[in-house]
Structure formats: C-alpha cells, structure tokens
Amino acid sequence: MQNRTTSVRVSETAGPSGKPITVLRFSGDITSTSKETVLGTYQGLPPEVKRILLDLSKVEYINSSGIALIIQVLMQARNTGRSVQTFGLSDHFTKVFTMVGMTKYTDLHADEQSACAAFTE
Amino acid sequence: MDKDVLEVFVLSLPSKLGHEKVAMSTAASVAKLMGFSEDRIEDLKTAVAEACINSIEHGNRMDESLKVGIILSMTATSLEIRVCDQGSGLGAKTSSPDIDSKMGGEENPRGMGKFLIQALMDEVEWINSQPTGSCARLVIHLKKPEGE
C-alpha cells in the first residue's frame, strides 16, 4: 500500500491590490514521501514571487511529517521575505496546525477569497 | 483481559509507511460503531496514525519483516488502542513543539508525533516491556472525564 501521491498545481491570481499571488494547490496526501513535491515545487518558484497561497482544500491526509514539510516551506519563505497565507484545511487540521503553533507564521483561512484578501502588500 | 472489555480487534501490519492508514481506518470504524462524534474520530485517526508511524520508523526501524501490532479494546464508555512494536520505546518524555526553534532551524521540523498523540487523546501511556518491545497505549472516552 502506498500513500496517495501528492500532486501540486501552480497558478497565479491577482490579490486585492492587483499584485500577483502564486497559488500552490495541493491534493492527495502530504507525508514524508511528499518532500520532492512540496519542497521541490516551492524551491522551483521564480525569485520574483513574493506572495504565496497554499491551497490545502484537496489534501486528504496530512501527518506530522507532512506538517514538517509545510514548516520548511514557511521557514524558507520567511528567510526570503515572502508572505504565505493558507486556506482549505478541515476543522480538524486547523486545530492541529494551531496546536503546533503554525499560526504564528501563516494565517489559516476558511476560503480562497479571505486568504487572498489577507495579503496586505 | 479486563472484564469490562466488550470486544477486541487485533491488527498486525508490516512496518511500512502508508500502512498506518489501515489502522487509522479500523480505529475510525470502531469509534463510529461506538458512537463517537466526528471530531473525536478525527482526533483518534491522527493519534493512531502517529503512533503507528513512530512504531514503524523508530520502534521497528523500517524493517518490513517486523510487525506493528494494534489491539483495539472496546468498553461501554471508552476505546483503548495499543500500538506495539519490537523497539525499545521513545521514552516517556513528551515536549510541546517549539515552532520558533523549528522555524529558526535550531530544532528538527519533525518530531511532533508524540505531542499530537498526547494532545488529542484522553489518556496516553508509553509502555516499555523489554525484551519483547514497547507499546503506546491510547485511550479515548465517550464522555470526557470530569473537570475537562
């Protein structure tokens, strides 16, 4: 048995100020086997990207190793002055992300619209 | 066996990442039969998955020939899950993750499994029964204990 493969689709949308937001839409499972998809995709973004939106609405299963990968994305984004907003987590994973302190480094939004509106720059 | 136990379910999984989902699904099915709420079932799924991952990665060191044993015992008011491996255990200490240290690169971004198990379950015990192995004992109550 394998974990459901992690997929990611990268797209661009405009924020309220008209500035571009890069959206990473994940689906499947995010586990220790997702490293290349999660970090590889993040690290492949062009340097001019400043605003990143993580769409986790189609993710079915995240374990602590998957959360660690999201932490690494947040860490690398912070080190390069990028802003990250997140949306689409279930109530349960919103609770789990909050428990481990992720909300210090990314806001967790219920939907894409409110997540986009949160980019202030 | 405890006289209050109504039913026991036993699973034996190869130590392979991904197989924890079998234990997760089984625990969720049993909890649903018992009448646990959806949010408690989600708590249980995460805790059982993390306990299995600890057993696969740390207890049995990813040796697929070694089994992770899962014993689910139902009583009228609680569900106990024992997740057992052939390792020496992770120790009883459970610390909260320090997100600032993780973000600063001073702490491994991983290593949150035990914390999540402890935070999501009503009772947790780490049992080291060398030389045979070690178990995580997780309990979830249908009604939260008084005072919580």
Image (cartoon, helix red, strand yellow):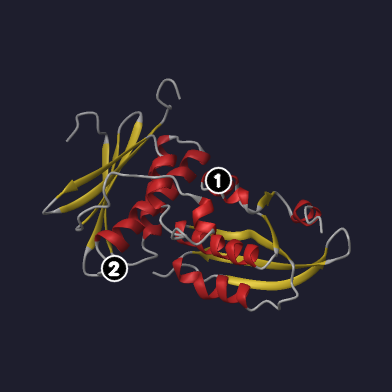
- Secondary structure of the residue carrying tag 1 is helix
Q: Amino acid at mark 2?
A: Met
Question: For the point 21% across and 58% down, which residue is it?
Answer: B87
Mark 1, other Cα within 10 Å: few <14 / some 14–19 / many ≥20: some
The quarter holding residue B92 reads top left
Viewed as shown, does residue B143 lie left or right of B123?
right
Q: Are marks 2 and 1 on the same chain?
A: no
Query: The C terminus of chain B is located in which quarter?
Result: top left
Asked if the residue under mark 1 is in contact with the one under mark 2, i.e. CB atoms within 8 Å, the reply is no
The quarter holding residue A47 reads bottom right
Viewed as shown, does residue A101 lie left or right of B32?
right
Q: Nearer the viewer, residue A44 or B55?
A: A44
Disc 2 marks which residue? B62
| Residue B52: % across, % down | 33, 55
Question: For the point 58% across and 51% down, which residue is it?
Answer: A102
Question: For the point 66% across and 66% down, which residue is it?
Answer: A25
Disc 1 marks which residue? A92
Using the image, name the chain to which the residue with label 2 belongs.
Answer: B
Q: Nearer the viewer, residue A47 or B144?
A: A47
Q: Nearer the viewer, residue B53 or B14?
A: B53
Question: For the point 54% across and 58% down, which residue is it?
Answer: B103
Viewed as shown, does residue B36 lie left or right of B84?
right
| Residue A91: % across, % down | 60, 45
Q: Amino acid at mark 1?
A: His
Cα separation, mark 2 vs mark 1, equals 28 Å
Mark 2, other Cα within 10 Å: few <14 / some 14–19 / many ≥20: some
Query: The N terminus of chain B is located in which quarter?
Result: top left
Using the image, name the chain to which the residue with label 1 belongs.
Answer: A
- Secondary structure of the residue carrying tag 2 is loop
Q: Do we see residue B72 in this rendering?
A: yes
